Amino acid sequence: MRALTVEPGIPNSARLDEVPEPPVTDGAILAKTLALGVCGTDREIIAGLYGNAPPGDSRLILGHESLGRVMEAPRDSGFSPGDLIVGVVRRPDPVPCSACAVGAWDMCRNGRYTERGIKERHGYGADCFRVEPEFAIKVDPGLGMLGVLLEPTSILAKAWDHIERIGARARGWKPKTLLVTGAGPIGLLAALLGAQRGFEVHVLDRRLAGEKGKLIQALGGLAHKGDPTSIDGMHFDVVIECTGAPPIICDTLSRAAPSGIVCLTGVTAPGHDCQLDVGALNRSWVLDNETIFGTVNANCRHYEAAAAALAQANKAWLAQIITRRVPAERWAEALEHRSDDIKTVIEFNPDRPS
């Protein structure tokens, strides 16, 4: 079968390979791969900056944002042939740590977890994949190919889970306003989940190229174009930072209202300096009881929440997030940055109308 593979640590070593069928040890469910989402992590792995092959292998099958259609499944698994599924990315460590032991492997404390398509486990970027029933998430059939957005949505479902748990500790906290920085796929999905919760949504993006502004407005949100000075004087109950850009992160830290919560979702490479008045920030955080936290990855509970959020979302709105679909044989085109891109997916065996 075809698979998109890379030799981790070797820049630009990615290629479309012929590899053996996935072993049963990967999981009892066999699925035909429909689509694979492309994100910054994939680009970093292909650039040789990140990633680890499984022990004993020199190459890693890429792909952690999956969508597949079940071909085979055990009778008692809860899955049937024809079901649309997404595979969970992270697996708990074998020790396990206190978090992994209770199913919260997204909060692994000893770093011995593995991740499909990223860290020591082959990914979903092949003509078919196997996955354990307990790490497979059923997708609403009405979503079709839009189900490939489930994994990135799970990151925001986790972010909102933490925001709501933190906020619940403050009696009388009734948040109304949300600022999202960045109108890429993560930012737009963060805004979607905020709108579903009834927030007044504000999205800041330096360009708002293409359809991004219209997508924000369709959620009932306000789009702010340019640098952070465009929202000077404004503070928000919840802030979700989705760019990973150091200057935006620095500014984000001062945008929370009293008792506000700031969630950082973007991953930044080290080596970037920016000027911060730590004294003023600390004074604000302490005196106003603000909370700042970072989040990445998700566990099954967040995937299920993400599946529910996508199922109730407007499908025409979701469809506009996927701006390019690239056939597997032309996978390299999916890595190109184009001005009107939001989300690019690689199609392996897409469903076709009969």
Image: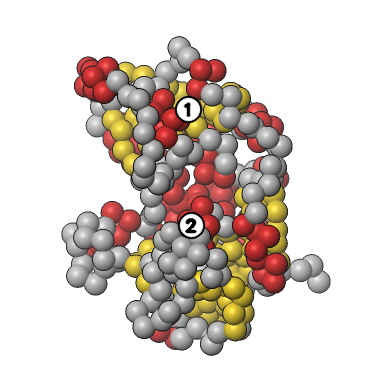
Mark 2 — residue? 44
Q: How many numbered discs sit on the rendered protein?
A: 2
- Looking at marks 1 and 2 on the same chain, the residue that comes earlier in the sequence is marked by 2
Q: What residue type is labelled 1?
A: Leu
Circle 2: is it few (<14), some (14-19), or many (20+) Cα within 10 Å? some
Against 259, residue 215 (above or below) is: below
Q: Which residue is drawn at the image coordinates 53% and 73% (left, top)?
A: 5
Against 206, residue 19 (above or below) is: below
- 124 and 72: which is toward the camera: 124
Q: Which residue is drawn at the image coordinates 40% and 84% (left, top)?
A: 25
Q: Distance between the residues labelled 1 and 2?
A: 27 Å
Q: Is residue 183 left or right of residue 331?
A: left
Circle 1: is it few (<14), some (14-19), or many (20+) Cα within 10 Å? many
- Residue 105, quarter of picture: bottom left
Q: Which residue is drawn at the image coordinates 70% and 67% (left, top)?
A: 330
Q: Which residue is drawn at the image coordinates 24% and 72% (left, top)?
A: 94
Determine whether label 1 and label 2 are within 8 Å by CB. Answer: no
Q: Quadrant of the C terminus?
A: bottom right
- Residue 82, quarter of picture: bottom right
Against 58, residue 328 (above or below) is: above
Mark 1 — residue? 179
Question: Percent position (x, y) of residue 317?
Answer: 67, 42
Question: Percent position (x, y) of residue 123?
Answer: 48, 70
Q: Is residue 336 left or right of residue 285?
A: right
What is the image's colouring?
secondary structure
Q: Can residue 198 be seen in this view?
A: no
Question: Percent position (x, y) of residue 83?
Answer: 58, 70
- 152 and 177: which is toward the camera: 152
